[in-house]
Image (spheres, rainbow, N blue to C red):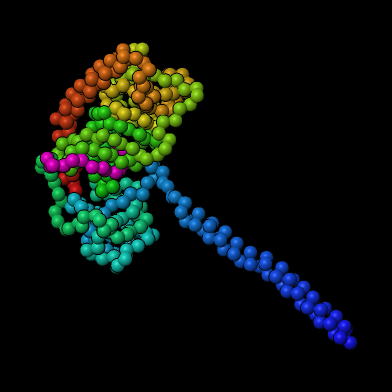
Amino acid sequence: MKRISLFFAALLVTVSLAGCGDKDKETEPQTLAVTEAPTTAQTETQTQTTEPQTESSTDKTRELNGLVTGVTADSVDIQTARGKKLTFTTTGAQVQTTAELKVGSQITILYKGKVVDTDTSGAKVSGIKDMDASAEKITEGEPIVSETADPNATGGTLNGTISDITGERIVILGDDGDSYYFTHDKCKMVLGNGIQDTNYVSVKFTGDVYGPEIVPAVEITDNTTNSAPQTENSTKVTGTITAVTMSTLSISADDGQELTFTITGVPVNITGGLMVGETVGINYTGDVSSAKVTSITDTTGGSASTDAGSNNAETNANTDSSASSESNATTESNASDAGQGENNNADVNAAQ
């Protein structure tokens, strides 16, 4: 009898242990499923959140700080830092201010398109947000007009689209709707989307951009990566610039030919600017008479080279000196004849 009891006891223990083992096996996959699924989902969410958002320089969102002077259901009136009064249509815009949008609010307007002088019809407002706390507060007052340049001005950076270029100066339409004039002698230009009136650029300059005199740009870039693509079958011709427009570049080639190329949207990567008298390299495909320009670079392809030897170095130095003298002479003439009139930043800023 004791043996039978012991047998049944042992049997019960065995069944019990087997049952526990089965339960462990059944719950193990569930534990993995619970811990793995959220981790994967979280990783995907984080990847989507941190993925950078980029805009083309030809369709850039502009930002303009302003003091609110009036608000309606579908518009907002602002005064810019330099006293210009502007009215923007706000239909469909996202208002993301921390407080009610009202007279006296310091805001930043986000828009695409263009403001020309006081005409905002070409601007599409996408959003309104609080002005950055580090920005200087705007006070209501009369437009600021500079009679003389600030001798203590050290320069800065101005953003806007290219509205015009010649062999003497370049004009940038700022976010505030004003036109700003710069010389581009010895100016580094890195423009992946080239010379076109929709290309949004940053201009680093010296001097007082709000003064009555045209100021020199030292760097102009549209912050794109395709600065100067080369093609395997491209041909390069070098020469001295004789004329520049928004759509064409004319050079006197080293072999004596007078050539004109279409350059709208062509990548530019140069260190000497596009002033008359500067030397450049034109990379193109096809026949020179019907060439398709692929990029505009320095004569050495955009990078310094010492392989040519001292003779070429002396020649380049003489060319640079001559180009600089001619460019400076042209710039001085332009500053006195046109810079004080049509190209005068003071006249442009008087509208502010």
Name, please, the residue furthest toward the front: 2
- The image shows residue 69 at horizontal and vertical percentages of 22, 61
- The image shows residue 228 at horizontal and vertical percentages of 41, 31
Residue depicted at x 59% and y 64%: 35
Residue depicted at x 13% and y 44%: 146
Identify the magenta region. 150-163
Q: Is residue 218 visible?
A: yes
Residue depicted at x 25% and y 28%: 185
Query: Seen in the image, is 89 located left or right of residue 291?
Result: left
Q: Is residue 208 above or below residue 103?
A: above
Q: Nearer the viewer, residue 321 or 275?
A: 321
Q: Is residue 127 magenta?
A: no
Name, please, the residue furthest toward the left: 147
Q: Nearer the viewer, residue 166 or 46?
A: 46
Residue depicted at x 31% and y 21%: 279
Q: Is residue 103 above or below residue 270?
A: below
Q: Which quarter of the figure has residue 182?
A: top left
